[in-house]
Amino acid sequence: MRLIRTLLVGTVLSLSALPALAKQDIIWWDFLSGGDGVRMKSLIDAFNKEHPDIQIKGTTLEWGVPFYTKVRTASAVGEGPDIMTYHLSRTPIGMQEKVLSEITDKDLGDAGLKKSDFFDAPVDAATQEGKLYAVPFDIHALVLYYNADLLKGSPYLDAEGKLTGIQTMADFEKALAWAKEKGVETPVTYQSGGDAGVWRVFYTLLSQQGGELVTNGEILAGDNAAKAAKVIDTLSKWRENGWAPEQAEYVASVALFSAGKSAFQLNGVWEVPTYKDLEKNGKLGFKWSAVEVPPFMGNRATWADSHAFAIPNQGDKTVSGEKRAAVMKVIGWMEKHSITWADAGHIPAYKSVTESSDYKAMQPNATYASLAEAAVFDPKSPITGVASPAYDAALNIIAPAIQGFMTGEDAVAQIKEELQGKLK
């Protein structure tokens, strides 16, 4: 008996001498505010609750230039986060700045993921020189919102009140003219006075013509110039005819639609929860929905980007070992729980979630999910992407041209001069 007691005491003492399993604190940076921020915080809280051994310590920074400037400077001196949200459109810039750490097949395995789990377009956007540098979380794209009440009595609603009969630009402009004749204040609204909104519409319509911004190191080469000018002149025509707003900033462009003053809106999927919440609280006052942007200029194509997860380099090093495995575990968990993120209007990049019955029950999300096949990401160039020279050109050249200060042809000449010098 004494021998057994001695053995037990010895075992307890031996176990107590072992080092405790280290808790991994994961430093997380994102740029997500509003509804996106609320949903991401709920995901982080849920992960932390389920994983006492891995705790995410989250910080939200200002979207756009401030976020990416902070990432670049912090990474350069080895003081960046362990994981960050990242726009895939900025992958080429991130490579140029040496910010992004390669996501290897082993990393994906640690997350319980593989490339084939995701839609092709965002994986391609996250890939540079055959290597993956971020894990796509969603596809967020331009969609066409419509006010079904304002379109009553038109040939543009079917028996179920769904949009119909609009495939070409001629169809759409007839619908805009019809709405104007019926007293609709602004038949179509979009952010006509801001860089992001102008770029998204411009790039969608350019891509629908098979146009490209950058080819073989040249800006709007060959007939791409004429295609770009056609887009600008079309958008200018909308304004001249009173179909689109004069220099509307983002909030104003959304307010035109939510106030029932626009029959259509060209905007991102992220406004879906805005209208759902207004509808739920009885503050919307009309029936609405959203669809993939029709092939106005010939081909199915719509501007798209992705929020993704990336691991920044820390000076000349990168997150490694157990910490890196923990980061990948976070990413894998987020992907597999992205139905919560889909509630923000985004299309999950992780296909099994988008193909799930839960997602298919989400409306109008499931209706426009087809655009995953038509998504066109910005060119793989350091002059494009969020907070890039291309966005500057949209604000400083394309927007004024839309407002009638120059022709589409003159605007294209300025775009070529402005961007060519920045293309290395």
Image (spheres, helix red, strand yellow):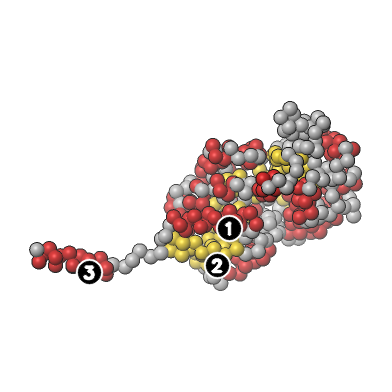
Circle number at residue 226: none
Q: Which residue is mark 2?
A: 80
C-beta proximity under 8 Å, tags 2 and 3: no
User: For residue 224, what is the image quadrant?
Assistant: top right
- The x, y position of residue 6, in whole percent, is 14, 67
Instruction: Residue 355: tell me if it is visible.
Output: yes
Coordinates of residue 282 in the picture (x, y in percent): 71, 46
Residue 294 percent coordinates (x, y): 73, 37
At 82% from the left and 31% from the top, the residue drawn is 153
Dot 1 corresponds to which residue? 85
Q: Indicate the amino acid at tag 2.
A: Gly
Q: Which residue is mark 3?
A: 13
Q: CA separation, marks 1 and 3?
A: 45 Å
Identify the residue at image location x=54%, y=37%.
357
Mark earlier in primary sequence (2, 1): 2
Q: Secondary structure at mark 3?
A: helix
Residue flagged by tag 3: what amino acid is it?
Leu
